[in-house]
Image (spheres, rainbow, N blue to C red):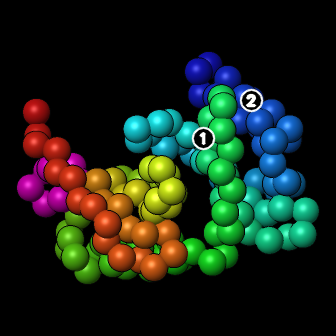
Protein backbone atom coordinates (compact mmCIF):
# COMPACT_ATOMS: atom_id res chain seq x y z
CA UNK A 1 0.00 0.00 0.00
CA UNK A 2 2.90 2.35 0.78
CA UNK A 3 4.30 1.90 -2.73
CA UNK A 4 0.86 2.63 -4.23
CA UNK A 5 0.56 5.82 -2.15
CA UNK A 6 4.08 6.86 -3.19
CA UNK A 7 3.25 6.38 -6.87
CA UNK A 8 -0.06 8.23 -6.51
CA UNK A 9 1.69 11.17 -4.82
CA UNK A 10 4.41 11.24 -7.50
CA UNK A 11 1.86 11.21 -10.33
CA UNK A 12 0.08 14.14 -8.70
CA UNK A 13 3.37 16.07 -8.34
CA UNK A 14 4.29 15.34 -11.97
CA UNK A 15 0.93 16.57 -13.22
CA UNK A 16 0.90 19.74 -11.11
CA UNK A 17 4.59 20.68 -10.99
CA UNK A 18 6.34 19.54 -14.19
CA UNK A 19 5.91 19.59 -17.96
CA UNK A 20 6.24 15.79 -18.16
CA UNK A 21 3.41 14.25 -20.18
CA UNK A 22 4.78 10.74 -20.76
CA UNK A 23 6.31 8.75 -17.87
CA UNK A 24 8.87 6.04 -18.58
CA UNK A 25 9.82 5.21 -14.99
CA UNK A 26 9.29 6.24 -11.37
CA UNK A 27 11.96 5.48 -8.80
CA UNK A 28 13.26 6.83 -5.52
CA UNK A 29 16.61 8.32 -4.61
CA UNK A 30 17.63 8.51 -0.96
CA UNK A 31 20.60 10.74 -0.24
CA UNK A 32 20.89 13.70 2.12
CA UNK A 33 17.39 14.39 0.84
CA UNK A 34 14.98 11.87 -0.64
CA UNK A 35 13.43 12.45 -4.04
CA UNK A 36 10.98 10.73 -6.30
CA UNK A 37 12.82 10.33 -9.61
CA UNK A 38 10.73 10.44 -12.77
CA UNK A 39 12.11 9.79 -16.24
CA UNK A 40 9.85 10.68 -19.13
CA UNK A 41 9.16 13.14 -21.91
CA UNK A 42 7.93 16.71 -21.75
CA UNK A 43 5.32 18.35 -23.98
CA UNK A 44 7.94 18.94 -26.69
CA UNK A 45 8.89 15.23 -26.66
CA UNK A 46 12.27 15.90 -25.04
CA UNK A 47 13.48 13.14 -22.68
CA UNK A 48 13.77 14.56 -19.15
CA UNK A 49 14.44 13.51 -15.58
CA UNK A 50 12.73 15.14 -12.61
CA UNK A 51 13.64 14.92 -8.95
CA UNK A 52 10.63 15.75 -6.81
CA UNK A 53 10.13 16.14 -3.09
CA UNK A 54 7.39 17.68 -0.99
CA UNK A 55 9.04 21.09 -1.31
CA UNK A 56 11.28 20.99 -4.39
CA UNK A 57 11.43 20.13 -8.08
CA UNK A 58 14.56 19.79 -10.19
CA UNK A 59 14.36 19.04 -13.90
CA UNK A 60 17.08 18.13 -16.39
CA UNK A 61 17.38 16.71 -19.88
CA UNK A 62 18.13 12.98 -19.74
CA UNK A 63 18.96 12.93 -23.47
CA UNK A 64 22.12 14.94 -22.66
CA UNK A 65 23.14 12.44 -19.97
CA UNK A 66 25.54 9.55 -20.33
CA UNK A 67 23.29 6.62 -21.28
CA UNK A 68 22.43 4.16 -18.52
CA UNK A 69 23.88 1.36 -20.70
CA UNK A 70 27.30 3.09 -20.67
CA UNK A 71 27.21 3.18 -16.87
CA UNK A 72 26.27 -0.52 -16.75
CA UNK A 73 29.21 -1.29 -19.09
CA UNK A 74 31.64 0.71 -16.92
CA UNK A 75 30.45 -1.10 -13.79
CA UNK A 76 30.77 -4.51 -15.45
CA UNK A 77 34.29 -3.65 -16.58
CA UNK A 78 35.43 -2.27 -13.20
CA UNK A 79 33.61 -4.83 -11.05
CA UNK A 80 33.56 -8.12 -12.99
CA UNK A 81 31.13 -10.63 -11.53
CA UNK A 82 29.27 -8.00 -9.49
CA UNK A 83 25.49 -7.95 -9.45
CA UNK A 84 23.97 -4.56 -10.23
CA UNK A 85 21.09 -4.10 -7.79
CA UNK A 86 19.81 -0.79 -9.16
CA UNK A 87 20.74 2.32 -11.09
CA UNK A 88 18.89 5.57 -10.43
CA UNK A 89 19.59 9.24 -11.22
CA UNK A 90 20.71 10.91 -7.98
CA UNK A 91 20.93 14.50 -6.80
CA UNK A 92 23.04 16.07 -4.05
CA UNK A 93 23.08 19.88 -4.06
CA UNK A 94 23.85 20.86 -7.66
CA UNK A 95 25.51 17.52 -8.47
CA UNK A 96 23.54 15.17 -10.71
CA UNK A 97 24.75 11.58 -11.06
CA UNK A 98 23.85 7.98 -11.75
CA UNK A 99 23.81 6.13 -8.43
CA UNK A 100 24.70 2.47 -8.90
CA UNK A 101 24.08 -0.02 -6.11
CA UNK A 102 25.93 -3.27 -6.62
CA UNK A 103 26.89 -6.38 -4.74
CA UNK A 104 30.49 -7.35 -5.40
CA UNK A 105 31.95 -10.86 -5.49
CA UNK A 106 32.85 -10.57 -1.80
CA UNK A 107 29.18 -9.98 -0.95
CA UNK A 108 29.73 -6.33 -0.05
CA UNK A 109 27.33 -3.66 -1.22
CA UNK A 110 28.82 -0.68 -3.00
CA UNK A 111 27.33 2.65 -3.98
CA UNK A 112 28.98 4.31 -6.97
CA UNK A 113 28.18 7.82 -8.21
CA UNK A 114 28.92 8.55 -11.88
CA UNK A 115 28.49 12.12 -13.16
CA UNK A 116 25.23 12.18 -15.10
CA UNK A 117 26.71 14.18 -17.97
CA UNK A 118 30.40 13.16 -18.16
CA UNK A 119 30.31 9.62 -16.80
CA UNK A 120 33.24 10.37 -14.47
CA UNK A 121 33.30 8.40 -11.21
CA UNK A 122 32.55 10.93 -8.45
CA UNK A 123 32.31 8.74 -5.36
CA UNK A 124 32.43 5.14 -4.21
CA UNK A 125 31.14 3.84 -0.89
CA UNK A 126 31.45 0.32 0.50
CA UNK A 127 29.09 -1.12 3.08
CA UNK A 128 30.59 -3.93 5.14
CA UNK A 129 28.49 -7.08 5.34
CA UNK A 130 26.50 -7.32 8.57
Q: Identify the element where label 1 is drawn.
A: strand
Calculate the distance from the C-alpha at mark 1 to the C-alpha at mark 2: 11 Å
Across and down, in percent, residue 62 comes to 64, 69
Left or right position of 35 against 7: left
Across and down, in percent, residue 95 comes to 47, 59
- Mark sitting on residue 36: 1
Q: Nearer the viewer, residue 130 or 52?
A: 52
**Residue 47 magenta-drawn?**
no
Q: Nearer the viewer, mark 1 or mark 2?
A: 1
For image coordinates 18% across by 59% down, the residue present is 104
Segment tinted magenta in the rendering: 102-110
Quadrant in which the C terminus appears: top left
For image coordinates 40% across by 57% down, the residue present is 99
- Mark sitting on residue 2: none
Crowd tier of the residue under label 1, counting other residues whose Cα lies within 10 Å: few below 14, some 14–19, many 20 or above:
many
- Residue labelled with disc 2: 8
Left or right position of 104 against 118: left
Left or right position of 49 against 124: right
Q: Residue furthest right?
A: 43
For image coordinates 17% across by 44% down, the residue present is 127
- Is the residue 101 above or below the residue 32 in the image? below
For image coordinates 32% across by 66% down, the residue present is 122
**Closer to the N terminus: mark 1 or mark 2?**
2
Q: Is residue 80 visible?
A: yes
Q: Is residue 103 visible?
A: no
Across and down, in percent, residue 88 comes to 49, 55
Amino acid sequence: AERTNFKKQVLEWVEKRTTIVEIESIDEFRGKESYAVVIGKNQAGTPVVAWLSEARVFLDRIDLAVPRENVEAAVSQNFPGADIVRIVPGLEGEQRFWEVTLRDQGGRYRYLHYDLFTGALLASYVLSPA
